[in-house]
Image (cartoon, rainbow, N blue to C red):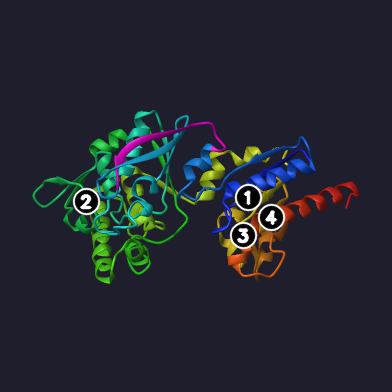
Amino acid sequence: MKKIVIIPDSFKGTMSSRMIGEIIAQEASDCWPGMETIRVEVADGGEGSVDAFLSVLPGTKHQLTVQGPYGEPIQSFYGQMGDTAVIEMAAAAGLPLVWEKLNAGQTSTYGVGQLICHALENGARKIILGLGGSATNDGGAGAAAALGVRFLDSEGKSFVPVGSTLHRIQHIEMHAAAERLKNVSVVAMCDINNPLCGPQGAAAVFGPQKGADPEQVVQLDAGLHHLADVIQRDLGIHVLQLPGGGAAGGMGAGAAAFFGAALESGIDVVLDTVDFDQMLEGCSMVITGEGRIDGQSARGKVIAGIAQRAQKKNVPVVAIVGDIADGAEQMYSKGVSAIFSINRVALPFSEMKHRAPSDLRQTVRNVFRFVKLAKEIQL
């Protein structure tokens, strides 16, 4: 064994991607002393995405004060690796910032735009924007306003819209923002396909968890629809049915319209940014995993995305997971070589999660012992 790449997703509610990676790396080093191990934390655009990127790539975590969801000053941050900045939307407009005061109609993404502005001033020319855990439903209008987009009402006055005031937008001016974003690429990490509006849209699906009652959901949905209409008329961009447009309270649509962002799955952004294909050169094995693997995983993001790339390089992929459910065998055609569950005894989840780290360690140890034995006897 020359090199192992370790790139697991988290086991939700049990172990983080970092913890899993550390355990696997330690067992690999014990089994093959001196072997190179590369650990990559999986980021999905939510909390922890900045740290995940900085754990692999050299960079800086910038701390600064921006406006919070209700316009209050808060301490926030973003990561920068060379001319690439990673920004978690939740760091300036996230649900944890407003748990005691949920109101999707009044919260703003303005602070997210301030983070982007600061990154641009620091020389960033590529922005990776994580769309996860937002407390907002403003269609990204607040962030756009911070970058210089002007939203004008019926009297021609400029204002910063929130979810409940999107219907007041009569005209959108992009000149200042377009100049600021010239020669800047923006990628939004987005792992949902919900459209901006309708029964599967931002307000209907995610509004209630942000404090919206049924009446507010209808109002918020109408506001986003109005925003989409004005965007189409003034900017010539169609976002109403954009897959992922409903992510983060419509930030998916707003990022595409105002920043020219491409909406991409989180795992693809991670793999491209860390140059995963190059990591596979000279690699003996890839270890990945997630909390549960089943037939849906073949249409999922993390394990399937990793395995398909590794398959092209003829690198075997071992998936170490919590539960193996019906249909998991479909993953073999996606490039997964073998699947192992860490569950060693039948216990309720409330008890299993406490022993998950030790069960993971034992499972990984057994997998590596078998791989080592297979090589020795040339199976």
Q: Is 303 in the magenta?
A: no
Q: Name the residue at 28% across, 71% down.
A: 214
Could you give the CA–CA distance between mark 2 and mark 3, rounded to whole angstroms? 45 Å
Q: Amino acid at mark 3?
A: His
Could you give the CA–CA distance between mark 3 and mark 4, rounded to whole angstroms? 9 Å
Q: Which residue is mark 2?
A: 161
- Between circles 2 and 4, the one closer to the viewer is 4
Q: Is residue 140 left or right of residue 47?
A: left
User: In this picture, is 302 found above or below 31?
Assistant: below
Q: Position of residue 154 (x, y in %)?
A: 11, 52
Query: Nearer the N terminus, badge 2 or badge 4?
Result: 2
Q: Which residue is mark 3?
A: 354
Q: Name the residue at 26% across, 45% down.
A: 72
- Between circles 4 and 1, the one closer to the viewer is 4
Instruction: Identify the disc placed on residue 238.
Output: none
Q: Which residue is mark 1?
A: 20
Please report the bounds of the magenta region as a residue range: 55-68
Query: Nearer the N terminus, badge 2 or badge 3?
Result: 2
Name the secondary structure under disc 3: helix
Q: Amino acid at mark 1?
A: Ile
> Tag 2: Cα neighbours inside 10 Å, few (<14), some, or many (≥20)?
many
Q: Name the residue at 24% across, 42% down.
A: 149
Could you give the CA–CA distance between mark 1 and mark 2, rounded to whole angstroms? 42 Å
Could you give the CA–CA distance between mark 4 and mark 1, rounded to whole angstroms? 11 Å
